[in-house]
Amino acid sequence: SALVGPVVISEIQYEGAPDVAGLGQAQLEYIELHNISNQTVPLFHPLEAHNRWRLAGGVNMTLPGELSLRAGGYLLLVSFDPVAEPAIASRFIDHYNVPDNVPLVGSFGGRLSNGGETISLLRPDNTQGIGHEDAGFVPYIPVENIDYDNSEPWPDDADGTGLSLQRITGSKFGDDPKNWLSAAPTAGRKNADAAAGDRDAD
C-alpha cells in the first residue's frame, strides 16, 4: 500500500453555511493538515529551506517559510491572510472554536469547488544538481492527492449545510471516499467519530 503521512489532509471545508458570524463563504473554507506521526515535520526541504511545501489543484499556495507541524498537531490553510486580516481570523477562530495552538496559514488562491475537485499537497524533492538536463529544477512529490466530490460515493451532505468532510482514519488512503464522513466542523481538533455517529451540527 502507498505510504500515507506523516502529514495528511484530514478535513476539507469546501462550502460553509452562508453568512455566518460575518464571514463570507470563501472565508469559511479551510483545509486541515494533521501530522499523524510522533515527530515534528518541517513543511520545507530540510536542506533547502527556501523550497517549501505547496498546495495545488483547485486551490493553490506555497506555504510560508520555516513552517513546521508539531507531532500530532494540526494546521489550517485558509483563504484569507490571518496576519493582514486579524478581525477575520478572530471571527473564524471563534466560529469554528479553533484551539489556541493551531496556526492559521493563508491565503490560498482559488476556491474549493462545491462540486468537487482535486486537492494536492506537494513537498519539494532535492534540487536537480549540475550535470542534470534540468539543473536547478525542483521536483515536487505528491504527499496527498484527494479527488473529493459532493455526491456518492462521497458523503453528499457537506454541501452548504455547514458540515465538513472529515477523514476517518489518518493512516488510511486519503483518496478513498469510504475513509471520509461529513460532520460538524472540527477545525484544528480531532475529527468526529464515525462509530459514535457524532455527525450533526449541534
Image (cartoon, rainbow, N blue to C red):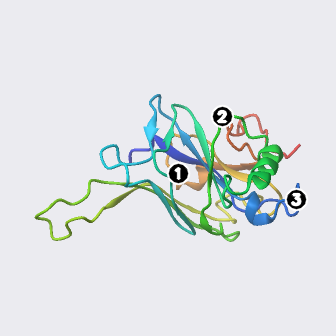
Pointers 3 and 2 in contact (CB under 8 A)? Answer: no
Q: Dot 3: within a 10 Å radius of its alpha carbon, few (fewer than 14), some, or many (20 or more) residues? A: few
Name the residue that disc number 3 marks: 22
Q: Mark 2 packing: few (<14 Cα in 10 Å), some, or many (20+)?
A: few
How many neighbours does mark 1 have within 10 angstroms: few (below 14), some (14-19), or many (20 or more)? many
Q: Residue at x 24, y 64 (%)?
A: 136
Task: Residue 45: give x, y in percent of width and height.
Answer: 35, 48
User: Quick one: 201 or 141, which is closer to the camera?
Assistant: 141
Q: Residue at x 54, y 54 (%)?
A: 176
- Kindly identify the amino acid type of the residue bearing the numbered disc 3: Gly
Q: In the drawing, does residue 140 fall left or right of residue 132?
A: right
Q: Nearer the viewer, residue 156 or 158?
A: 158
From the image, which quarter does the C terminus lie in?
top right
| Element assignment for label 2 | loop
Q: Residue 35, position in %: x, y? A: 52, 38
> Along the horizontal axis of the image, is 103 left or right of 121?
right
Q: Which residue is mark 2?
A: 101
Q: Position of residue 133 (x, y in %)?
A: 15, 71
Pair 1/3: label in front: 3
Q: Secondary structure at mark 1?
A: loop
Tell whether 150 sits left or right of 64. Answer: right
Tell me which corner region of the image, top left, top right, bottom left or bottom right, holds residue 119.
bottom right
* Residue at x 81% of width, y 56% of height: 162
